[in-house]
Image (cartoon, rainbow, N blue to C red):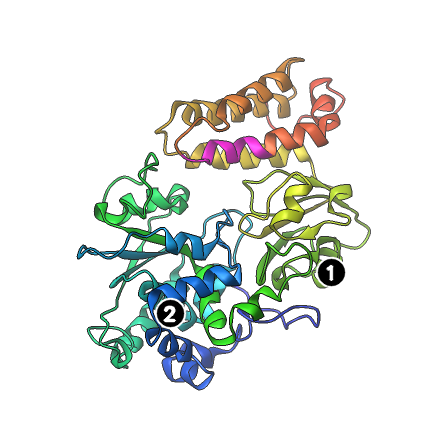
């Protein structure tokens, strides 16, 4: 993994303040930098008041869905003597996204502190952090951080002398994309096959081991201590466009870009300036062709849609896509869009858990049709077939993996149809061997 870039003057540095600072990894170093002050403050605050603060701040889930965090915490039933769980989703496997791993890699105690505050807010005693199996470096760093936190009394039967019991368990995934879906993750933790569950019941009613559970993403939880320390109004003030999108957001920029990396922006920052100013734009001599703004599972935007787009939840939706996880994949004018859409479809076909027929069969057939087109054997009705397949894959399965496969296919055909037609008309050389 590469070393973080120096912060750009136009970034709003909050979560990424200590990226690259090895001293922030240790317990002593984190405390020296003001760490765990928010947890001490939170443990002296009533859970309902913490939930109200997070609601007021406008913090929304940073893992992809953008659901209001305080509202999610408030969905937990009142304590009734049963065990309750907080699960931290650290299974960052969305193609194009690499910001959660950096939070864990450089500021592991920020994650632990956010988890502990959230656990207190929902009256849970047990935290389970589910870390992607391939994250070797973050796993080792998080393991060391947990051990240090226990040794210093932050976790255990008397967390920071509060009389509250808070325990942390690290659980390592095995490399399944589908386990990033919250209910598939719960099944995986329970030792079952990582298949998504039908909802309702929702995790707040019947989650881990059938007990009340809240699931939050790494970046979401890492933002919580800052809100507790600085207040809800401070967080609400971090908004450059729509007031429903507040705070900062780590954007992972990759692809045909001169300065790839994570950039922390205030929500509402102009996408055009993020790509061309902060990240340096496409390589010399190349022009911007397309952007996938929120990880590979969201619709593709063309260059015209990027211009004037605010990088926040509402701004990107208005341009026909989604902020998602904030994994921004940039493509220049050298990109074969048909080939890249095939690569995305092949990923989703490979990662389907095969539980739902529409996903199991639809993703596989989508790949086969795209391969036929790229091999120079496309048929005139293949694009209608792809759109029909996508329609039957969207909104008709337990989770949204098949929707994620359909999104780039549909948006790609809508915005770059000429490239598909060129293959079908044999006006373009085949990009794949005959199939």
Q: Which residue is mark 1?
A: 280
Question: For the residue labelled by badge 1, is the local secondary structure a helix, a strand or a loop?
Answer: loop
Res 333 visible: no
The overriding secondary structure of the stretch rendered in magenta is: helix
Question: For the residue labelled by badge 2, is the local secondary structure a helix, a strand or a loop?
Answer: helix
* Image vertical order of residue 335 relative to residue 100, above or below: above
State the residue at coordinates (69%, 55%). Answer: 257
Q: Which residue is mark 2?
A: 141
Give the magenta-colored segment's residue range. 399-407
Mark 2, other Cα within 10 Å: few <14 / some 14–19 / many ≥20: some
Indicate the position of residue 244 as horizontal and vertical percent values: 59, 54
Task: Name the side, left or right, on which 355 lies relative to 245.
Answer: left
Mark 2 or mark 1, which has the lower sequence index? 2
Q: Residue furthest left?
A: 81
Rendering quarter of residue 390: top right
* Image vertical order of residue 145 relative to residue 198, above or below: below
State the residue at coordinates (63%, 63%). Answer: 265
Task: Name the side, left or right, on which 424 lies relative to 222.
Answer: right
Res 409 visible: yes
Q: CA distance from mark 2 to mark 1?
A: 31 Å
């Amino acid at each position: 993994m590469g070393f973080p870039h120096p912060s750009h003057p136009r970034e709003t540095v909050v979560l990424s303040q200590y990226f690259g600072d090895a001293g922030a990894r240790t317990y002593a170093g984190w405390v020296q930098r003001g760490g765990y002050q928010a947890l001490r403050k939170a443990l002296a605050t009533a859970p309902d008041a913490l939930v109200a603060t997070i609601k007021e701040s406008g913090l929304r889930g940073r893992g992809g869905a953008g659901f209001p965090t305080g509202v999610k915490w408030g969905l937990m039933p009142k304590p009734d003597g049963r065990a309750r769980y907080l699960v931290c989703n650290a299974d960052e496997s969305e193609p194009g996204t690499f910001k959660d791993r950096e939070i864990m890699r450089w500021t592991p105690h920020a994650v632990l502190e956010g988890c502990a505050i959230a656990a207190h807010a929902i009256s849970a005693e047990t935290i389970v952090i589910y870390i992607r199996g391939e994250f070797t470096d973050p796993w080792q760093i998080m393991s060391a951080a947990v051990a240090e936190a226990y040794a210093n009394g932050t976790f255990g039967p008397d967390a920071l002398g509060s009389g509250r019991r808070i325990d942390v368990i690290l659980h390592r995934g095995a490399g399944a994309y589908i386990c990033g879906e919250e209910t598939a993750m719960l099944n995986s933790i329970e030792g079952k096959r990582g298949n998504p569950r039908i909802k309702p019941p929702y995790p707040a009613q019947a989650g881990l081991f059938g007990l009340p559970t809240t699931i939050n993403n790494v970046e979401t939880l890492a933002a919580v201590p800052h809100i507790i320390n600085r207040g809800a109004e401070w967080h609400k003030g971090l908004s450059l466009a729509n007031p429903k999108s507040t705070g900062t957001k780590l954007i992972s920029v990759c692809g045909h870009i001169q300065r790839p990396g994570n950039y922390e922006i205030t929500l509402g920052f102009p996408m055009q300036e993020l790509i061309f100013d902060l990240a340096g734009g496409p390589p010399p001599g190349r022009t911007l062709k397309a952007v996938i703004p929120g990880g590979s599972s969201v619709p593709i935007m063309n260059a015209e849609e990027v211009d004037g787009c605010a990088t926040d939840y509402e701004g990107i939706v208005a341009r026909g896509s989604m902020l998602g996880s904030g994994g921004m994949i940039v493509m220049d004018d050298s990109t074969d869009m048909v080939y890249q859409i095939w690569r995305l479809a092949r990923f989703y076909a490979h990662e389907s858990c095969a539980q739902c027929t529409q996903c199991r069969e639809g993703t596989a057939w989508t790949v086969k049709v795209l391969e036929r087109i790229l091999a120079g054997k496309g048929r005139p009705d293949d694009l209608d077939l792809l759109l029909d397949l996508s329609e039957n894959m969207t909104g008709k399965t337990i989770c949204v993996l098949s929707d994620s496969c359909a999104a780039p296919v549909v948006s790609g055909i809508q915005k770059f149809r000429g490239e598909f037609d060129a293959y079908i008309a044999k006006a373009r050389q085949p990009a794949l061997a005959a199939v």
